Image: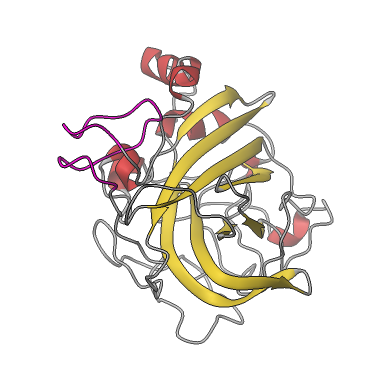
Amino acid sequence: MRDNRIDRRKVLVIGGAAAGAAGLALAGCGSSDGSTSDTGSTSSGSGQCVLMSSVTEGPYYLDNALVRKDITDGKKGVKLTVRLTVQDTTESCDPVSGAAVEIWHCDAWGYYSGYTTASPGGEAPAESEDTSGADDKTYLRGYQIAGDDGVVEFTTVYPGWYTPRVTHIHLKVHTGGRKEDGTYEGGKVNYTGQLFFEDAYGDVVHRLSPYSQHTGTPTRLDDDMVYGGGGAKDGLMTITGDPTKGYVGTLTVGIDPDAENTGAGGGNGGGGEPPSGPPPTGAPSGAPSNAS
């Protein structure tokens, strides 16, 4: 039986997270010795901005996401605000105005919109049993377009889990396109990545309803096949808040606005086994076969 008690380390992680609210960065500017700056971003030994490598977009990407702040579509769960800042890491770390940030993730039971026939592993209700009225093609997917400060913010719910992956959020950064018919068209993808959480947060959230209706053994962060193990530089978010009022995750994403990314990046351990059960229906052409 799983021990539902919160140990001292988990309490310290959750209770002390506010001290590092601005401390998350995949890339950014820092001091010449490679230490973390006041904004918590990472740097190379030369003090230059660091462009981090991309990871796979995974098999659950769809290109129909809407431009909107609230991506829940009525899905239930612990509130999560994702606040991202896009920077140009090729020169001065200036914000990238007009960058379109796209995120997507699974719901509290491990299902992705558009792929609701794929089993999340363990024991979970059928996705259709969620009576929240969410659109099964668009929930937990969306774009936001950065202002002059390079900042975007999403309102969503804390993700669930599915076998064999740890809890995570996918993201892409696009530039050069435009908002059209409620979505984002044209341009190119500059960055493809994933965001991660300390295990302690999931240990708390996934015992709450509706998460608790999905039973099984979630993958731990250190065992995940995509997370690189490097902390903030590999997408490990600093989270503030609590499950009652909601959490906030912040991240500085460094991109090369002139680069184009295919979404085929690797991860720690590469491929891995696909989700159990029938394969996703209506998968995009050429979608990766791994469970990323």
Give residue 2's position: percent from left, percent from top: 44, 30
Task: Tell me what residue is drawn at x 49 percent, y 26 percent.
Answer: 21
Q: Residue at x 65, y 43 (%)?
A: 157
The C terminus lies in quadrant: bottom left
Residue 96: percent from left, percent from top: 50, 54
What percent of the width, then of the height, locates residue 278?
54, 74
Q: How is the image coloured?
A: secondary structure
Q: Is residue 292 visible?
A: no
- Left or right: 47 in relation to 138: left
Give the answer, above or below, for where 88 lies relative to 246: below
Q: Position of residue 144 (x, y in %)?
A: 65, 56
Query: With 117 as the anchor, is 58 left or right in this view?
Result: left
Q: Which residues are magenta?
A: 30-49
The quarter in which the N terminus is drawn is: top left
Q: Quadrant of residue 66?
A: bottom right
Does the magenta stretch mainly form a helix, a strand or a loop? Answer: loop
Residue 135, above or below 106? below
Residue at x 32%, y 57% (from the top left corner): 90
Residue under the point 60% across and 53% down:
146
Magenta includes 9? no
Foreground: 121 or 168?
A: 168
